[in-house]
Amino acid sequence: MSEPEKNYITPNGYRTLLTELDHLTTVERPRVTNEVTVAAAQGDRSENAEYIYGKRRLREIDRRMRFLRSRLDIAFIVDPKEDRGDIIYFGATVVLEDVDSGEEVSYQLVGSDEADARKGLISYRSPVGASLMGRTIDDEIRAKTPGGVRSFVVSEVHYK
């Protein structure tokens, strides 16, 4: 049997997943379980909206907990503070200049579980992230973005 694929993640991303799992395990699931118990005591469960909704919510919580455990089990933590020079690898914070507009954007390359483009965190597997891997300052990349194919020049690379 082949080894499961590694889930590359930053220390901060790992803590975030762990915190969510802990919250679901110690707070959310016990609270919803209690609500279902109270609703079940009210009698006929077939027309009891609180009971039906509570059971559905428990299934959602259990599904999310299984997902989080599976991602944490294969997590491979990479510290972005490890300086790798000017070569772009996982964890790098990169400043890009849009070739057409001259606008600068900054992204950190992170794992898929922690990506949030609004916060400047993009997956190293995203079109932009994948095209940056192994590149360096002054390299030009072309990547498919939600706004179409765009060209960028790498202007800065940091590990922090």
Image (cartoon, rainbow, N blue to C red):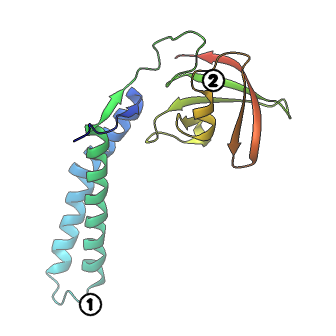
At label 1, the amino acid type is: Glu
Point out residue 10 in the picture as x, y percentages from the top left corner.
42, 28
Instruction: Reply above or below: 12 against 61.
Output: above
Residue sitting nearer the eye, 90 or 3: 3
Q: Earlier in the sequence, mark 2 or mark 1?
A: 1
At label 2, the amino acid type is: Val
Residue sitting nearer the eye, 120 or 33: 120
Determine crowd level at label 2: few under 14, some 14-19, many 20+ residues with C-alpha closer than 10 A.
many
Residue sitting nearer the eye, 157 or 130: 130
Q: Residue at x 27, y 79 (%)?
A: 52
Residue 158 placement: quadrant: top right
Point out residue 30 in the picture as x, y percentages from the top left corner.
19, 58
**Secondary-structure class at tag 2:** strand
Point out residue 102 in the picture as x, y percentages from the top left corner.
84, 29
Do the residues under discs 2 and 1 have CB atoms within 8 angstroms? Answer: no
Which image quadrant: the N terminus?
top left
Instruction: Give the numbered dot on residue 58.
Output: none
Q: Residue at x 40, y 32 (%)?
A: 8
Q: Residue at x 61, y 40 (%)?
A: 127
Instruction: Give the numbered dot on residue 94.
Output: 2
Q: Residue at x 17, y 84 (%)?
A: 42
Instruction: Reply above or below: 92 against 47.
Output: above
Point out residue 9 in the picture as x, y percentages from the top left corner.
40, 32
**Secondary-structure class at tag 1:** loop
Residue at label 1?
47
Tell me the CA gap for discs 2 and 1: 55 Å
Left or right: 38 in relation to 148: left
Residue 19 placement: quadrant: top left
Q: Nearer the viewer, mark 2 or mark 1?
A: 2
